[in-house]
Amino acid sequence: MKTKELLSSWGIPFDAVNVEGNPSSLKELERRGLRLVPVLTDGERFFHGWNPKELARFVGVEHREGKRLETAELACRLLRILAAAERAILEVPPKGLKVKVPNRDRTVCDLAFHLFRLSLAYRDAVETRYFPESWLQETAPSEMHDGAALARYGEGVRKQLTAWWARTDISQDNIVTYYGCQTGPELLERTVWHAAHHLRQLYALIESMGSTPRDPLANADFEGLPLPHQLW
């Protein structure tokens, strides 16, 4: 669920601005040290990031926690999403990797890299108890110029997470993120639906190029995740 949809469910009006397409809005965010969306403002205060509890506090309403999948199930979902993304990126033709995604200054290549990187960022955040926004701003390095290289990176991320979970308990501790504090399970859920959302976008982009994703995930693999209704 996006910020607009969440606020609407609370009966609060919301006007969205496409920051990347609005230089003045982007400059205002940068002036305040904010480089990632979503950002919510009432003209004086700014709320940064996706954190429903903090968002509710910002707008002055009660937050009721929805039912979250078990952490073990979330971990399994993330590994399946990563494997699916590895298969999907191989279906993108070389020229297609340079295509810009809708409403973002981001290529398909960078979208795939971002999907894999944000998944590994969860592990890094748990280990350091810190999640800076810079991790989500990284773009694909020059050596990842084709689908095979991106898929190999994704496979490496998946294997690292599998090995890490085999020797590490899923943390319940608070983690300081760039948008506020979250527990380990909360950040894991955010990571899984974030990766799932980008996988759905990747599927849509592949289909727009005239191809079909190979062995795509079923709807059941997305059930129980608080995914946005809209792709872009």
Image (cartoon, rainbow, N blue to C red):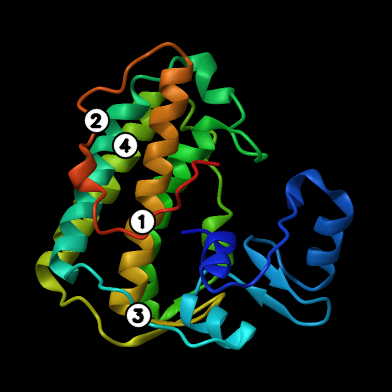
Residue situated furthest front in the rendering: 11
x, y (%) of residue 115? 41, 46
Q: Earlier in the sequence, mark 1 or mark 2?
A: 1
**Circle 3 sits on which residue?**
65
**Circle 4 sits on which residue?**
85
x, y (%) of residue 183? 35, 82
> Does residue 106 lie above or below 197 as drawn?
above
Residue situated furthest top in the rendering: 210
> Does residue 19 lie above or below 63 as drawn?
above
Would residue 68 appear left or right of 38 to someone viewing this image? left
**Circle 2 sits on which residue?**
216
Q: Earlier in the sequence, mark 4 or mark 3?
A: 3
Rendered image quadrant of residue 182: bottom left
Q: CA distance from mark 4 to mark 3?
A: 29 Å
Would residue 187 appear left or right of 3 to someone viewing this image? left
Q: CA distance from mark 3 to mark 2?
A: 30 Å
Which is nearer the eye, 57 or 137? 57
Q: Earlier in the sequence, mark 4 or mark 2?
A: 4
Q: Which mark is residue 193?
A: 1
Q: Earlier in the sequence, mark 3 or mark 2?
A: 3
x, y (%) of residue 211? 37, 13
- Closest to the camera, between mark 4 and mark 3, is 3
